[in-house]
Image (cartoon, rainbow, N blue to C red):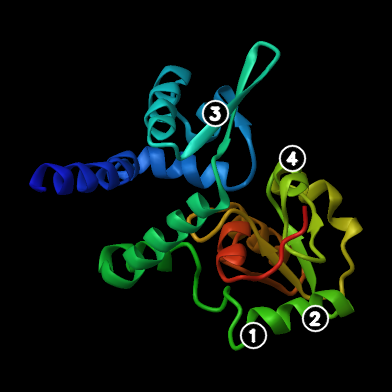
Amino acid sequence: MRDVKNHLYEQVARIGKAMASSKRLELVELLCQGEKTVELLAEQAEISVKLASAHLKALRQARLVDTRKDGKYVTYRLSNTSVADLWVAMRTEAEERLVELQVALAGIVSHGDALQGIDRATMLQKAKSGEILMLDVRPQAEFDSAHLPHARSLPVDELLKRLAELPQGTPVVAYCRGPFCLMAKDAVELLRQHGYSAHHLIDGVAEWRAQGLPVEV
């Protein structure tokens, strides 16, 4: 029986081993935004294609990601939305336990940037009624894969030249890939410099879905 128990724990440990890499966690977060080629994942994670392939192989061996052939390219995706939930749960637990992480996150969301006293359900209602403008500043392909309800796509690298498209009198709530993503922070700073009332929503699609809230595909 001991051999059986050892085998059971070893199988579960495969998941832990696959996730026990900071770069593999980043790749999982990127795949929470939608399927991507290994070349795009390498570019966004700022590593070589060879290293990205090795990390993705480890994730695939643990059945955390799947692949499909798209011509000469191999496209990766999470095997299930539960993998995104696992990433959110791990990160949330780390935020609760690790002071070092709390300090680092405080540098991303400056005091006054985050929304205070507004729950997600209320935020949805305000976005639906037009009281706030929910702005998705991720790349367009990620928005097309999944986004928060009533959100509008305006990638951060296009924001400056397309500011005129945004109504001046409506508060803007910008979000990107989650708490570790800097795109929404940059967008909020740019919007405020140009006179907009802007706020940083640290949630991304994975965090929203993990709370049981709807996303649009």
> Is residue 62 toward the left or the right of residue 14 in the image?
right
Q: How crowded is the residue under tag 1: few (<14 C-alpha within 10 Å), some, or many (20+)?
A: few
Quarter-of-image position of residue 169: bottom right
Q: Disc 3 on helix, strand or loop?
A: helix
User: Going from the N terminus, do you reach mark 1 or mark 3 first?
Assistant: 3
Could you say which disc has been placed on residue 43 in the image?
Answer: 3
- Disc 4 to disc 1, C-alpha distance: 29 Å
Whether 92 is drawn above or below 132: the answer is: above
Could you say which disc has been placed on residue 126 in the image?
Answer: 2
Task: From the viewer's side, name the closer residue of 101 and 187.
Answer: 101
> Is residue 125 toward the left or the right of residue 175 in the image?
right
| Residues at circles 4 and 3 in contact by the CB criterion of under 8 Å | no
- Disc 4 to disc 2, C-alpha distance: 25 Å
Residue that badge 4 annotates: 141
Quarter-of-image position of residue 73: top right
Q: Disc 2 on helix, strand or loop?
A: helix
Q: How crowded is the residue under tag 4: few (<14 C-alpha within 10 Å), some, or many (20+)?
A: some
State the residue at coordinates (71%, 43%): 157
Residue that badge 1 annotates: 118
| Residues at circles 4 and 1 in contact by the CB criterion of under 8 Å | no
| Residues at circles 2 and 3 in contact by the CB criterion of under 8 Å | no
| Residues at circles 1 and 2 in contact by the CB criterion of under 8 Å | yes
Quarter-of-image position of residue 31: top right
Residue 23 x/y as whole percent: 38, 38
Task: From the viewer's side, name the closer residue of 35 and 151.
Answer: 35
**Amino acid type, residue under disc 2 in the picture:** Lys
State the residue at coordinates (44%, 54%): 87
State the residue at coordinates (58%, 73%): 113
| Residues at circles 4 and 2 in contact by the CB criterion of under 8 Å | no
User: Going from the N terminus, do you reach mark 2 or mark 3 first?
Assistant: 3
- Disc 2 to disc 3, C-alpha distance: 36 Å
